Image: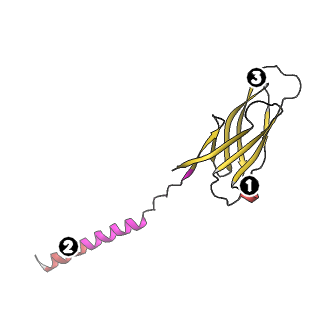
């Protein structure tokens, strides 16, 4: 092989290597998967998920009549590491039909100032404040694992 051909081949290899290296450096890194907590809740049918706004609670509660509304308090952290809140059920005003009703819960447990920066919470308990004496007295959710 002639010296000029060897030099051309070596130059071509160097250029290809440089382009490949530059392409690898320019490539954006793949995003790192984020783990999110998975919760199991009682009573059955309730779900809890972590969002940027706080902990999102979903489910349905039975009520003595249709038309109940609800309000949820700001979450607080207990000494044992359990996050707690209170969900207050309010009956409808005036006369209502006397049949069982349901209220759909779709609430965010807001992270109060004391909870900012708290990592994943392992247990959340929401006490039910209601004007009737049957049904569950609380909604309890425990972390059962992590998912990506």
Give the farthest residue toward the right.
94
**Alpha-carbon span between mark 3 and mark 2:** 85 Å
- Please name whichever residue, 110 or 8, is drawn nearer the observer in this view of the structure: 110
Secondary structure, mark 2, is helix
> Is label 1 in a helix, a strand or a loop?
loop
Q: Which residue is mark 2?
A: 9
Classify 10 Å Cα crowding around label 2: few (below 14), some (14-19), many (20 and above): few
Q: Nearer the viewer, residue 11 or 90?
A: 90
Q: Quadrant of residue 93?
A: top right
Report, in whole angstroms, how far the alpha carbon at label 1 lies from the one at label 3. Answer: 35 Å
Q: Earlier in the sequence, mark 3 or mark 2?
A: 2
Q: What's drawn in magenta, residue-wise?
A: 13-36
Q: Which of disc 1 and disc 2 is earlier in sequence?
A: 2
| Foreground label between 3 and 2 | 3
What is the number of the mark on residue 78? 1
Total labels drawn? 3
Placement of the N terminus among the 4 image quadrants: bottom left
Labels 1 and 3: the sequence-earlier one: 1
Image spot of residue 42 (x, y percent)? 65, 38
Picture layout, residue 62 above or below residue 123 = above
* Residue 22 magenta: yes
Q: Residue at x 30, y 70 (%)?
A: 17
Image coordinates of residue 135 in percent, x first then y, are: 74, 31
User: In the picture shown, does residue 133 fall above or below 111?
Assistant: above
**Residue at left offset 69%, top offset 32%:** 60
The crowd level at tag 1 (other Cα within 10 Å; few <14, some 14-19, many 20+) is few
Residue behind mark 3: 100
């Amino acid at each position: 092989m002639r010296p000029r051909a060897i030099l051309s081949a070596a130059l071509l290899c160097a250029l290809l290597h440089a382009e490949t290296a530059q392409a690898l450096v320019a490539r954006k890194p793949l995003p790192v998967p984020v783990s999110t907590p998975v919760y199991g809740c009682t009573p059955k049918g309730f779900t809890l998920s972590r969002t940027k706004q706080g902990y999102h609670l979903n489910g349905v509660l039975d009520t003595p009549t249709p038309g109940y509304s609800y309000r949820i308090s700001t979450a607080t952290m207990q000494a044992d590491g359990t996050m707690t809140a209170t969900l207050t059920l309010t009956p409808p005003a005036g006369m209502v039909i006397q049949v069982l009703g349901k209220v759909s819960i779709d609430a965010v447990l807001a992270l109060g100032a004391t909870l900012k920066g708290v990592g994943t919470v392992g247990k959340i308990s929401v006490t039910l404040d209601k004007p009737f004496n049957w049904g569950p007295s609380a909604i309890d959710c425990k972390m059962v694992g992590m998912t990506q």
